[in-house]
């Protein structure tokens, strides 16, 4: 029954199908109304105008047959006109056509007309010698032609429906382009605008496509301006930071200056890391970000990062992991940021952060890093991986970072074709990175 589900889904979700169905229902309703109105009008016309003419015509036909009835004349009328004639009486009992096998009630209707309505009785005449002449329309004329007209009407209705569907599909074709363009713009691809049909004289859908193109161009300009500003600031800050760090290290190591010197060096290191993270985020956010991939022993890579952290960390690493094609420097950046974040937010938790690495069913690797801190509010989970976002705006930069760590981790995971999710673990927060078997 998959075709039934597809049909039901198309009827529910497809604007084209719903419009065509509406046109068909409208056509059927109009046809039924027209036929009913015409039938009522013709019925009134029959009673008011056609009935006297038919009565007069039947009288003339009966007079032509004569009294006593002349069978030859009756047969001539039946051959010339679409009529069936039956004569019954004391002398002549004759019918122009025998009873048809498919209509067993005809003989009874011709023998006994007691159930005929008033209009049917108008087709019966009695002669002076006691014969009854009954006129009826030819069965062939009224069976074949309505059947032909019915099939022709159905064929025309299907043809008009097909033409209406084709026209509706042509009219709504811009919706497919608008949908595809919106998906491209949402993915950050602004290179190809949405095609606008009849650009000189656009309709409402054309105006909508042009409006979305304008919006996409504005968004691209803003993103380019932001990227250019961040890159310019980052590049310009590197040189003075390097000189400031060099001058600070050249200060005399006296007891009076030692504390200030170390504090200044820490601040300069934070600023250096911030500039580095900004540059790396802009490189990775580019759709054509270049990764220097090579075969990586992921188990060894994780253990090296954990050892360099010099902090207590629990590990649950599978003994056998697939060898993946990864950028080792970016993966170290991902693991280091995740672990730094977990250590920073563990606080006074009873357990140290946990890093779990397992092979997944698709042949890739799943990485989970969990802290056992307080976690965050559920409504803030979706914003944690946004640049410069910090759940607690009152935290100091030293204690809470600048909000680029998780953002960089997400960019690294996506650049490798993987996924990045954040969830509350109760207690704490768990970040899961899924890397596919074939990485870019």
Image: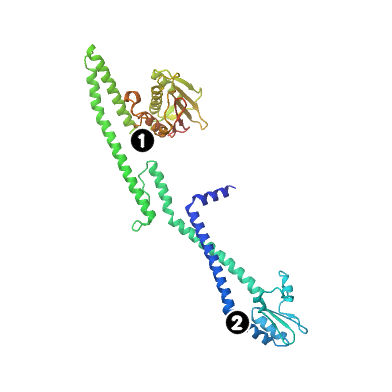
* x, y percent for residue 359: 50, 28
Position of the C terminus by quadrant: top left
Q: Which one is earlier in the sequence, the residue at label 2 or at label 1?
A: 2
Tell me what residue is drawn at x 31 percent, y 45 percent: 218
**Residue most toward the top?**
255
Res. 297 visible in picture: no
* x, y percent for residue 221: 30, 42
| Nearest to the observer: residue 117 or residue 234 | 117
In this rendering, would 125 be left or right of 181?
Answer: right
Disc 1: which residue: 285
Asked whether disc 2 touches disc 1, contact meaning CB atoms under 8 Å apart, the reply is no
Answer above or below: position of 433 versus 24. above
Q: CA distance from mark 2 to mark 1?
A: 90 Å
In this rendering, would 22 be left or right of 206?
Answer: right
Answer above or below: position of 6 versus 327. below
Tell me what residue is drawn at x 58 percent, y 79 percent: 50
Res. 279 visible in picture: yes
Other-residue count near label 2 (Cα within 10 Å), few / some / many at <14 / 14–19 / ≥20: few
Local SS, label 2 = helix
Tell me what residue is drawn at x 51 percent, y 50 percent: 12
| Nearest to the observer: residue 341 or residue 108 | 108
Answer above or below: position of 195 versus 38. above
Other-residue count near label 1 (Cα within 10 Å), few / some / many at <14 / 14–19 / ≥20: some
* x, y percent for residue 338: 40, 26
| Nearest to the observer: residue 285 or residue 211 | 211
Colour scheme of the rendered structure: rainbow
**Which numbered tag is attached to residue 52?**
2
Local SS, label 1 = helix
**Which numbered tag is attached to residue 210?**
none
Looking at the rendered image, the disc whose residue lies closer to the viewer, 2 or 1, is: 2
Count of number-bearing discs: 2
């Amino acid at each position: 029954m998959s075709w039934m589900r597809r049909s039901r889904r198309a009827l529910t979700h497809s604007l084209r199908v719903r419009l065509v169905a509406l046109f068909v229902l409208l056509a059927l309703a109009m046809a039924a109304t027209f036929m009913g109105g015409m039938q009522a009008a013709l019925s009134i016309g029959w009673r008011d105008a056609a009935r006297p003419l038919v009565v007069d015509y039947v009288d003339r036909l009966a007079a032509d047959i004569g009294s006593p009835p002349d069978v030859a004349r009756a047969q001539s009328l039946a051959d010339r006109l679409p009529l069936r004639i039956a004569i019954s009486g004391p002398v002549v009992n004759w019918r122009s056509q025998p009873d048809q096998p498919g209509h067993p009630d005809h003989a009874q209707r011709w023998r006994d007309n007691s159930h005929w309505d008033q209009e049917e009785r108008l087709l019966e005449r009695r002669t002076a010698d006691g014969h009854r002449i009954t006129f009826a329309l030819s069965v062939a004329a009224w069976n074949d032609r309505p059947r032909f007209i019915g099939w022709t009407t159905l064929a025309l209705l299907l043809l008009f429906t097909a033409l209406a569907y084709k026209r509706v599909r042509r009219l709504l074709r811009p919706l497919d382009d608008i949908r595809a363009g919106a998906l491209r713009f949402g993915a950050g691809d602004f290179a190809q605008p949405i095609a606008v049909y009849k650009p000189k004289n656009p309709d409402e859908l054309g105006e909508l496509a042009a409006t979305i193109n304008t919006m996409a161009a504005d968004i691209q300009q803003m993103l380019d301006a932001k990227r250019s500003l961040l890159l310019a600031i980052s590049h310009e800050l590197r040189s003075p930071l390097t000189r400031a760090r060099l001058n600070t290290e050249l200060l005399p190591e006296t007891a009076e200056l030692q504390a200030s010197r170390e504090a200044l060096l820490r601040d300069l290191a934070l600023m250096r890391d911030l500039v580095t993270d900004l540059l790396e985020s802009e490189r990775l956010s580019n759709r054509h970000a270049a990764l220097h991939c090579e075969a990586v022993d992921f188990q060894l890579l994780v253990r090296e990062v954990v050892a360099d952290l010099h902090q207590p960390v629990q590990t649950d690493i599978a003994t056998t992991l697939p060898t993946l094609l990864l950028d080792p420097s970016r993966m170290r950046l991902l693991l280091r940021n995740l672990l730094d974040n977990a250590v920073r937010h563990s606080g006074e938790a009873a357990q140290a952060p946990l890093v779990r690495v397992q092979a997944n069913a698709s042949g890739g690797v799943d990485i989970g890093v969990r802290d056992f801190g307080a976690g965050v509010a559920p409504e803030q989970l979706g914003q944690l991986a946004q640049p410069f976002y910090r759940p607690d705006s009152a935290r100091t930069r030293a204690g809470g970072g600048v909000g680029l760590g998780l953002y960089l981790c997400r960019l690294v995971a996506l650049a490798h074709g993987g996924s990045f999710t954040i969830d509350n673990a109760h207690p704490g927060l768990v970040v899961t990175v899924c890397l596919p078997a074939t990485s870019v």
